[in-house]
Image (cartoon, rainbow, N blue to C red):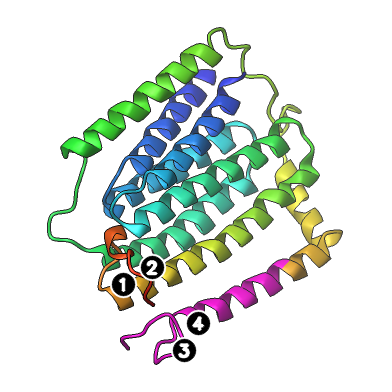
Amino acid sequence: MSYLVCVLLFGLMVGSVGVASNRSPYFAAMGLVMVSGVGCGVLICFGGSFLPLVFFLIYLGGMMVVFAFSAALSAEPYPYGWGNRSVKMYVAAYVLGVGCAWKVLLGKWSGFWGGNLDESGELLVLRGDMMGVAAMHDVGGWMLVLGGLGLLLTLFVVLELVRGVSRGGLRTV
Amino acid sequence: MTPIQMTFSTMFLLGLMGLTFHRTHLLSALLCLETLMLSLFLATSLWALQLSTINIACVPMLLLAFSACEASSGLALVVATAGTHGSDHMQNLNLLQC
C-alpha cells in the first residue's frame, strides 16, 4: 500500500514539474489534470472519501474546464511542447532541484507517519471527512455565508473587468 | 520529514518558481498559481485525514471556494489583456496603457 502512495507521489512531482516548466498553457493544463487525478488518488489512500471527490469533480471538472476554454486565448500556431530546448532545460533544472532537496531533506525517511482515517477496519457509510464538511454547514454556517458573499462579489468583479466600452478593462470593444 | 510533507512542500515551491519565472504567457502563470492552491488543498486535506481532526475538513472546502474566486478574477484579467493587447504575451505588457 505504501508503494502505491510512493508511485502517486512521484506522479504528483512529475505533474508539478510539467506545470512549472512549461511555456505553453496547453501542456501546463495537461500537467495540472494529471496532478488533480493523482492527488485524488493520494487522498483516497489516506482514507478520505468526500475530499478526493471534491478535488476531482469541482477542481478538475469545474475550474480546469474554464482554464481549458481560456487557453484558446493564448493560441499560437506552434506551441512550445516538451521537445523544445528551453522547456527541456527548465525541466532538467527543476528535476535536479527537487532531487537534491529530496536527497538532503529526506535522506532517511521516517516512514509514512500518521495513519488512515479508516483504521477502524469496518466499512462505514459516513466517513470522517464527510462529517467534517458537514460541520461546515452546521457550526460554520456564517463562514459559508461569507464564502457565498465573496463568490457573489467575485462575479460582479469579473463582470466589471470584462465590461468594455470605456469603463472596463477592455478598451477596444 | 515524511514523503507526504516533502511532496506537497515541493509542489508548493515548484508552483512558486513557475509563477516567478513565467516567460511568455500570462495564462501559464495563472496555472502555476493553481498548482499552489492545489498543494495547499492537498496539505490541509491530509491534515484532516492523517491527524483525524475531522473538523479541519472545512478548511480545504473554503480554500477551494476562495481559490475559485481568485482563478476567475485572474482569467477575467487574461481576457481583458487579450482584448486590449491582442494576446496574453507578457512582453506586450510593457507600456502603461489600459
Q: Name the residue tied to disc 1.
A: B82
Which quarter shows the N terminus of chain B? top right
Q: Marks 2 and 4, Cα distance to the nearest angstrom? A: 13 Å
Q: Are marks 2 and 4 in contact (CB under 8 Å)?
A: no
In what element is the residue under mark 1?
helix
Circle 4: residue type = Leu
In the image, what residue occupies the spot 73% across and 32% down? A122
Q: Which amino acid does label 1 sit on?
A: Ala
Q: Which chain carries label 3?
A: A
Q: Mark 1, chain letter?
A: B
The three-letter amino acid code for the residue at tag 3 is Arg
The stretch of residues the image draws in magenta is A147-173
Mark toward the viewer: 4 or 3: 3
List the residue tagged with mark 4. A159
Horizontal relation, residue B3 to residue B60: left or right: left
**Mark 2–mark 1 distance (CA, rounded to whole Å):** 6 Å
Outermost residue on the right side: it is A139
Mark 4 belongs to chain? A
Q: Nearer the viewer, mark 2 or mark 3?
A: 3
* Residue with the mark numbered 2: B78
Q: Residue farthest to the front?
A: B96
Q: Mark 3 points at which residue?
A: A167
Q: Are marks 2 and 1 in contact (CB under 8 Å)?
A: yes
- Residue A37 visible in the picture: no
